[in-house]
Image (tube, rainbow, N blue to C red):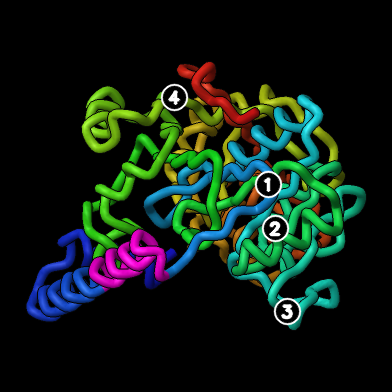
Amino acid sequence: MKNWHQVWAGIAEGKKRGLLASLLRAALTALSAIYCLLIKSVLFLYRLRILRRRKLPARVISVGNITVGGTGKTPLVEMLARELGKRGCKVAILSRGYKRVHSRWSIVHSKMGVVSDGTKILMDAMEAGDEPYLLAKNLPQVAVLVGKDRRLTGNYALNRFSVDTIILDDGYQYWPLERDLDIVVIDSLNPFGNGYLLPRGRLREPLGNLKRADVFLLTRVDQGNAVEGLMERLRRLNPQAQTLKSVHQADHLIDLRTGEKTELTILKGKRVLPLSSIGHPESFESTLTDLGAVIVDSVRFPDHHLYQTGELKGVEEEAIRKGAELIITTEKDAVRLPLRKSDFPFLSLVVKLKITQGREHLRIY
């Protein structure tokens, strides 16, 4: 579906021609230069210790990236929390809670909220944000908190839930808090966008800042075409960091009408309509094709889109027009879909992260 993200991409990547597009590109480039100066200035103040980083009395692991858009952080956060729990660690996950709305469970003047206390979920997906809610749903014994100030949410988790390990979800750019391990997730399909910083490109900070990372995790290496070249580039940027490879592996399907688990084999030969609002819908759709599904069309919304009932009705009508037998969405999208009665088969695809190379270098304990 046509949206401002597509318009921006067409201008920023040089696909749109003409005087107006050229002027807008020049303006975006100038804004990127200003943004770069601001980033460097803030980091310089931290180096001078004018701005100070705080240390929490717990092991802190950051999972982040250097670009905007989906790279596959959430499955890694979930995997790490499970592994740490098996080792006897008491874990809390701190997330910003992107696009969440404040609720009755928000505390400290709405500066933070408890999505899960490790025993029960206290927020819905709208109140928590889709990714924190999904983490809370999949990790019932892990406390999940949201708020911009991770020092505040971290101290609350330590005092209220007596945790000993904290995972910062999307924490690479959260400079006020020290961490014991910095993991940067990089999408092999589109690692750095067009190479420009925001707003001209997808980079959150200059590539040279990757030297802060301890570990690089490359995702979707089975779909990327230049993985070895990317690894060599990362080695030049940061020779000390370890580089791991991973894939997103389809695990099962969930029938959204009944909540029942369904095997992947039902997709073989089925005509499907994928519905998504994620950073890289192409990867999701490619996975469905690999599972034997026949894609009749696809419906894409901007990342983290808050679905309306009328939109879902339109998607269903589109599926019927195209002769689809199933509508398939992502697990992250599923938590944002409004409940509605429908006889049309509607399923979500559950995907797990699998590290295929270098797992021995992931020292999280």
- The answer to which quarter of the image holds residue 283 is top left
Specify the farthest residue to the right. 119
From mark 3 to mark 4, how far is it between C-alphas? Answer: 38 Å
What amino acid is found at the position of numbered circle 4 in the picture? Answer: Lys
- Lower position in the chain sequence, tag 2 or tag 3: 3
Report the side of 275 relative to 146 (left or right): left
**Between 267 and 337, the one nearer to me in the picture:** 337
Q: Secondary structure at mark 3?
A: loop
**Between 60 and 303, the one nearer to me in the picture:** 60
Q: Quadrant of the C terminus?
A: top right
- Lower position in the chain sequence, tag 4 or tag 1: 1
What amino acid is found at the position of numbered circle 1 in the picture? Answer: Ile
From mark 4 to mark 1, how far is it between C-alphas? Answer: 24 Å
Q: Secondary structure at mark 1?
A: strand
What amino acid is found at the position of numbered circle 3 in the picture? Answer: Ser
Q: Report the mark closest to the observer, 3 or 4.
A: 3
Which residue in the protein does label 4 denote? Answer: 245
Q: Report the mark closest to the observer, 1 or 3.
A: 1
**Between 40 and 187, the one nearer to me in the picture:** 40
Say few, some or many: other residues with alpha carbon within 10 Å of mark 2 (under 14 / 14 to 19 / 20 or more). Answer: many
Which residue in the protein does label 1 denote? Answer: 166
Relative to 309, say whether 353 is above or below: above
Report the side of 323 relative to 120 (left or right): left
The residue under the point 56% across, 26% down is 363
Relative to 327, say whether 160 is above or below: below
From mark 1 to mark 3, how far is it between C-alphas? Answer: 21 Å
- Lower position in the chain sequence, tag 3 or tag 4: 3
The residue under the point 81% across, 33% down is 261
Q: Report the mark closest to the observer, 2 or 3.
A: 2
The residue under the point 48% across, 26% down is 246
- Residue 291, percent across and down? 56, 25
The answer to whether the residues at label 2 and label 1 have Cβ atoms under 8 Å apart is yes
